[in-house]
Every structure is written in C-alpha cells, then in structure tokens.
Image (cartoon, rainbow, N blue to C red):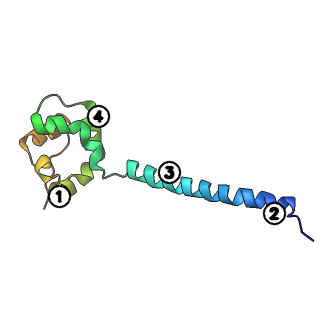
Amino acid sequence: MTTKPSAAAARAAVVAPLLLLLVAAAATMTTTTEAATSPCNPALLTPCAGPALFGGAVPPACCAQLRAQQGCLCGYARSPNYGSYIRSPNAAKLFAVCSVATPRCG
C-alpha cells in the first residue's frame, strides 16, 4: 500500500526551495547595495581619473564623489594603490575646483 503525500506536503516541497532562493537573492542584493553605497569606495571616483591624471575640466560627478568621500581621502592617500593620485599636483587642483579641503593626513 502506497501513501500519497498530502497537498500541504506537496506545496511545502515546492515552496521551501523557492523560499531559500528568495532569501539568497535578498542577501546578495543587500551585500551589493551596501558595497555601492559604502562611504569609502574608490571605484566611485572614476569621474576624477582623467582630471587627476592629465588635468583638464573637472566633471560635476567628480566633485560630488570627492565631497561624499571626503572622510576617506586620507585612507586613500595612505594606500599604495591610490596614494600617488591623492598627492598629485592635479589632485590638488581637483580639490580646489571642487571646494574640498586638501587632505592633511598625519
């Protein structure tokens, strides 16, 4: 004699994996959103790359990101990856154009 699973058990067997997928997707989205909105994200300074390297016009997006990440600039200045950009003469011009205080890092 074979017992047939109840309708509730069948629904649970379908809903449980979907619920796990939903939770996993939500966790991924939260992590991605936190990374994108983190106050210190040097990737968001890409609008400043051209003017920092070569001089020239400073786009408004660069100034907005410099202001948003002003508290991060000393950390970037200490970084072997970003320090030379933050301490460059062109970066000093960026800070002046954007009315951002030049970082004084101790």
User: Split into 4 quadrants, where in the image is the C terminus?
Assistant: bottom left
Amino acid at circle 2: Ala
Q: Earlier in the sequence, mark 3 or mark 2?
A: 2
Circle 2 Cα neighbour tier, 10 Å, few/some/many (<14 / 14–19 / ≥20): few
To which residue does mark 3 refer? 29
Q: Earlier in the sequence, mark 4 or mark 1?
A: 4
Left or right of 105 on screen, residue 67: right
Q: Secondary structure at mark 4?
A: helix
Disc 3 to disc 2, C-alpha distance: 30 Å
**Pointer 1 with pointer 3, Cβ within 8 A:** no
Amino acid at circle 1: Ser
Q: Residue at x 10, y 50 (%)?
A: 84
Spot occupied by residue 61 in the image (x, y as percentages of width and height): 29, 34
Left or right of 21 on screen, residue 78: left
Q: Secondary structure at mark 1?
A: loop
To which residue does mark 1 refer? 79
Q: Earlier in the sequence, mark 3 or mark 4?
A: 3
To which residue does mark 2 refer? 9
Vertical placement of 84 versus 59: above or below? below
Circle 3 Cα neighbour tier, 10 Å, few/some/many (<14 / 14–19 / ≥20): few
| Quadrant in which residue 77 is drawn | bottom left
Q: Earlier in the sequence, mark 1 or mark 3?
A: 3
User: Split into 4 quadrants, where in the image is the N terminus?
Assistant: bottom right
